[in-house]
Each structure stands twice: as C-alpha cells, then as structure tokens.
Image: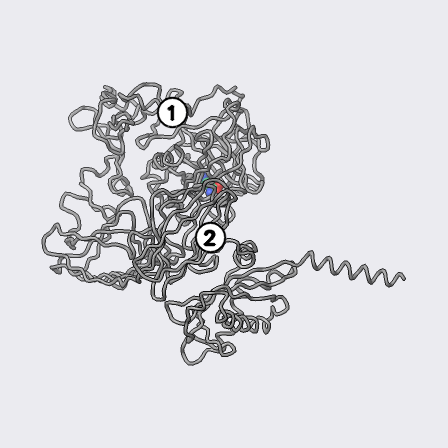
Amino acid sequence: MFVVVVIIWSLLWVFMFRRESNSGAYFAGMFRVANVEFIPEYRQVESHEFASMANKIQHVVSYVYKQSSVSRLYKQAVISDLSNNNKGGVLVHFWMVFVVPRLKTPAVCEECVGAIFRDSVYTSLQNRSSVGYLLSLPVDLDSILINAVQRSDYTSIAAGSQCIEKLYANLPGMRIPLNVFSSWGGVSCHVKLTAAPGFLIRLTVSSFLVQPTDCVDDGLVVYDALLPMRGRILLRLCEPVTEAFSLVSTSNVMLLSFTMTSGNKNFRGDFEAIIEELCLSRIEIKSHPDFTGDLYSPFYPSLLPPQCSCTWTFQTYSSALGVALHFKNYVLKLKDMKACDQGWWKINEVIYCGTYVDHSTVFRISNPSPEVEFRCSSRTSVQAFEASYTSYNISQPCPESHFLCTTGLCVDKVRRCDGLDDCQDESDEIFCSRPSTNCAGSGSLHPLFVCNGERDCSNGVDEINCTQETTCSGISFQCSSGPCILKKNAKCDGVFDCRDQSDERDCECGDPSPVKKEASSSSERIVGGVNSVEGEWPWQVSLLFSGSMYCGASVLSSDWLVSAAHCFSKDRLSDPRLWRAHLGMLNQGNAKHEAEIQRIVVHKYYNAFTFDYDIALLQLKKPWPPTLSALIKPVCLPPPSHTVTDSHLCWVTGWGYRSEGDKVLPTVLLKAQVFIQSQTDCKKSYSLASPRMLCAGVPSGEQDACRGDSGGPLSCQEPGGGRWFLIGIVSWGLGCGRPNLPGVYTRVSKFTSWIYSHIS
Ligand code: ARG
C-alpha cells in the first residue's frame, strides 16, 4: 500500500513538476528555396499547391532538427508564407516551436537554432554555390535568418490570426491605400505586403494618430520580412506622425505590425511597388566657378533601407580643382575600428563612415576626377541625406580672408575668437587667448563682454543700450515676436527687456525658495560636496530603474523632466514602465511624490560612443499635484544666448557616489560647487568635447559629480540672488574628482528649442 502511494505521488509530482517547468521557445525564420518556380497558388494558404509545398518544407525542417542535439526539445515547424523573391525561387517564412524545461533554455538559444540549420545546409553545399540540398530541397545558405520571437507574436500571427491582412502590389507606380483603425475594441493587426519579384516596396505613412507611450500601448513596427523578426526591423513608430514620410524595403515583402489600444487611433498611408534604383552617375562640374549641383541619397526623400548602393564619378574641368561635397546635416569621418552604421563611403579607395549631425559640413576631395561610392549600412531605416557639389581650388580651399573650420566650412577670419560658433563645431572659438575688454571705445567691444550682466569695463560701456534691438545672432536674446536684443540673460530676470515683454513670460521656475539654512558643519560628500537641505533643489529628481537608484533628472514642468540620454540607451533601460521618478526628495526613500513614466524621448542624434547629444526628456503619466509646489518646482531653461559669468554660482547635485572607488550610495542629496570652464580649457582635458558639452569643476578636481549623478542638474544662480537656470546635465568624465579632469555636462542652452518643441 505504502509503495503504491509513493509511486502515485512521485508520478503525480513528476507530472506536475514537468508541466510547471516546461516552457515554449518560439522562433521565426526565413530562407530561400532556389531552383523552384513560384506559382501564384502559393499565395493562398488554403490552396492544394501551398499545402503540398509547405508539407515538403516542414518535413525538411523537422528532419534537420530531429537529427540535431536539440531533437528532444523540438516540437514543430509551421510554414506561414511562400512568396516569390527578387533572387528567384521561393522565399519561405516559417515558425518553430521548442518545448524546453526551464533549466535547459540555453540549449535552444537563438544562435544555436540558427547554426543547426545553417550547418546542415553548409555540409550539403554543392560546387561553389551557396545552395545546399536538404532531402533534395535546394536551400540558399546566405538567405537563412532565424530569430527568437515572443510567444505573443507567435500566438497573434501564427495561431489565433484574428487580424491578418495580405495585400499585393503587382504593378509598379500604383499607390494602394492602406488605412488601419482601432475601432473601439483595440487592435493588434498584421498587414503583409508583397510586390511582384524584382520590385521593392515603398510604404508611405501619411498620418499616425496614437497616444505616445514608447510603443507600450500604441505603435507600429515595420519589418523587412513577412514575420516579426527582430533582425529585420525597418522602423519602430511609437510617436504620432502628422507629416508624411516614406520608407523602402530591401526586397519584395514587408510586414506591418500594429498595436492600438481602444480610442480613436488610426493609421493612414499607402504602399507601392517600386523598381530597384540603379544608382550610378557621371557628374561633370562645369567650368564657371559658381556651378553647383545636387546629390541625393537613393530613394530620396524616403528613408534609406539597410541595403542600397550608389556610385558617383566626378570630373572637374582642371587638375587644380577638387570636388567639395556640402552636406546639410551629415558628416564624413575616416572609418575606425567600429562598423559604419549610418552610411559607408569609399572615396578614392579610402573608407569613411557617415554620421548625422545637426549642422552643415563640407567634405573636400583633392582630386579632379574622384569616384565616390556610397552604401547603406544601417540595421534599420535611417534618414535620407542630400548634398550639393561644387569644385574648389585644391591649393586654397577657402578664400584668402577666410579660415578653414574642422567642419570644412570657410568663415571670415574676423569671426575667429569672436565668441560665436561660426564653424558649427567651435573650431573658430578654441585656442583663443582670453579676449581683451577693449573698453577705451576705439575698436569694438568683444561680444563676450557685451551685455552679459557683468560690468567688465570700469566706465560701464559694455553694459549700455542692452535692450536696443539688433540683428539676431547666436549671442543675442530673441524676443517671441522676432526682434533680438543684446542683453544675453534677459530671460526671467525680473525686468521687462523685450517690447513684447516675452522675456518675463513663463517664469515660474528656478525659484530661490527660502530654505532654512542649516549650519554647514556637515561631512565632506558627493565628490567633495556637502548635504543639501529640504527644498534647496526643488527641481532635483531621482530616477529609479527596476527599484534601484540609477540616474538623476530635473523638473521642467508639471509633467516633463529632463535627463541624460545615456541613462536610457540600452535595451531594457528604454522601457518607460521600468522607471519611477522620485520628486521633492531629500533623503532616498522619502520622496514627496512618486511618478510613473509615460514616455522617454531620447535625442535622435545621441551617440553612445561619443556621448554627444546626451539629453532625454521624460513625460510623466500624471502631473505632480500642485499641493506639493512648495517642494517641487521647475528649473529655468537658459535661452541659447545665455552666458555664465564669474558672478554666477553653479552647483552640481545628486545622490551619486562620493568618490571613484566608493561602494555605498549616500542617502541624502549632496551638493558641490563647481566652476564652468571655457571651451578652450575643456578641450585641453578632453579633446573630444563637442559644442554640446561643457566642462565644470575645480582645478584640484576635489568637487565633482560621479557615477549615479548622471542626468541630474548643474544649476547656476543668476548674480545677486536671481533665479536658478539648468546650465548642464551630468553626462560623463574620466573617473571622478581627478585633478585637471573636470566633469562633462550636456550644454542645455544648445537644446532650448529642441526641449520646447517637445514639451509645449
Ligand atoms: N556617467 C555617469 C553616470 O552615469 C556620470 C559621470 C560623471 N562623472 C564625473 N566625473 N563628473 O552617473
């Protein structure tokens, strides 16, 4: 009796344990079957022809995995689509399901599953072609792609299939409308587009009306395949679209996966079959000196697909003339160890990588007949580019009186060291000696001293007529109605400077809230900082990722925060659901308000290698309650003209480490006073500092931010107890608190209009 009970118990236990610990692993894959003629019936899953072909392929896939090391885990393959293909033959899209005991998950890793299939084709390769035979099925080795997918993808497309639309574009040049609505119930829909072989698909998005939530609720993912394969994402659209744009596939198929929660959400657009462009041209640059022409990226103005190529061969009319390419927002740099991901260029046998930037550049080729080859090299769709070309004098690229910037632009020599970034990369403003004030009145005053709020000349001439309207430039303050005044820090200084009074509008910010001053006997902390007191930095926010302190941020309004892009740059970090913002807090764990994040807007030019454009905005799900407005307050945003003088007081704040080797984070918010360096000095410490960065610290290095402070504010108070402005965002630095290695901050005044374009 006892034995029987034990046996039954064990059986029951084994049975339950196994059921509980098994899980499915799902894969989507594609490969090309060569030498098989595509017939239109293959498009109909219900057709007899599809069934027999699918059966055969399924048999082959099963055969491969049943023979492999994971045979016991393999459950089934489902052939989902057979399409005709630009390379000939039939393109197969299929699903695979493995049943895996939880502990064995690594055995069916994505790479392993792909390798098993590739290996079996590889060992059956014939001659020198890329086609191998699996049970007499000719499979193209180069076409195999297998990706792990979410169970939900599998169930929504393969199994349940409540909303799958298949559309065809057979004739090129015919735009087929495509409109998707989330009528009340909310939808998750898949639209499969196929064009005749030899063609590509261009999808035009005219409008996309959704709630922006970083694709958590609403979104569209466009794949360069018929199944949702991660390796084939062309575009993820999580934000509403009101201005039409288009993108192009690399073959004749495309999948659109929509998720739209209930409400009045919709997508409007169309798609068409287009011919693959043969992008090859010879360009002669005519002999008159002002001759220019335009160069466009393939499929312009559509986004660039992951694959494309173009070759332009230039010819100037004299061996003394080279070719200059003028880009609007793109720069070419010699290729280094890293792969090019925004365009690969070969110019006279030298390889360059392209990168998008927010300013113009000139690339000069000192050769009268260069060959310029361009290849798309991104994993997803990227922005199109346009350039114009001219010839230039090889021995003298810039006119006599001009200076050659590192960006390739030529600027008048009188603009060198004038305090204005004419070169767009500050190359005309570094290695300048500190300008002399020139107060005597003979020459003109250096713009740096003019109307900066500081009396630099004893006779005061640098601070007169500051509200007089002048021509607008990067160092003048622009009033809302258009005119510019010389006064650099006119914003929210309590004086009406603009005729339209716009300089004193929206000034509920940077309030020097009356804080109870605590006797500062406190211990040395942050790097060389001291404890803050309650309400001293009411814009300071702590950002927690999955429950742990990860970054800082600053309050801009009742529902927007600003932080650093690098806080959100890796996979899971970009998911807004995993973040919490703690507001009005002095000691960690004692927030006055905890907010959920609705979406994260990372600057589109953020570069994870150089930390350029290290800025991001966070929108809160709900505004913080106005009842807390004594302890939570926005900081002021500096206008582009804002300048920090010696009389400004600047402090960096955060809950980050107190030294480079520190292991415990402080609980109380720390502050350290730092001084803003000139860009010339900044570049002496960090040659890679961009115009979007600023350095701040103390010569000894003893006061600094450190790990954990990232994204938090560098706040500066206007002289004479004025308002606090967000001058910097903690970004990076070499170590923490080292002598002559200041902290590097994102220069907020460069992003004022970018910020307003998102938050207002
Ligand atoms: N990147 C750092 C962070 O993630 C901030 C480093 C600032 N370093 C410095 N020495 N100022 O928190």
Residue 292, percent from left and from top: 16, 52
- Going from N to C along the chain, the mark reached first, 2 or 1, is 2
**Quarter of the image containing the C terminus?**
top left
| Residue 506 numbered tag | 1
Q: In this view, does 413 lie above or below 104?
A: above
What x and y, as percent, mark residue 34? Answer: 42, 74
Side of 310 relative to 654 (left or right): left
Residue 78 rendering spot, x and y as whole percentages: 54, 65
Labels 2, 1: front one: 2
Residue 225: x %, y % from top left: 43, 60
Colour scheme:
one colour
Tell which of 215 and 600 is nearer to you.
Answer: 215
User: Element under label 1?
Assistant: loop
Q: Quadrant of residue 337?
A: bottom left
Residue denoted by label 2:
257
Which amino acid type corresponds to the residue marked 2 in the rendered image? Ser
Residue 631 against residue 110 in the figure, above or below: above
The amino acid beneath tag 1 is Asp
Rendering quarter of residue 280? bottom left
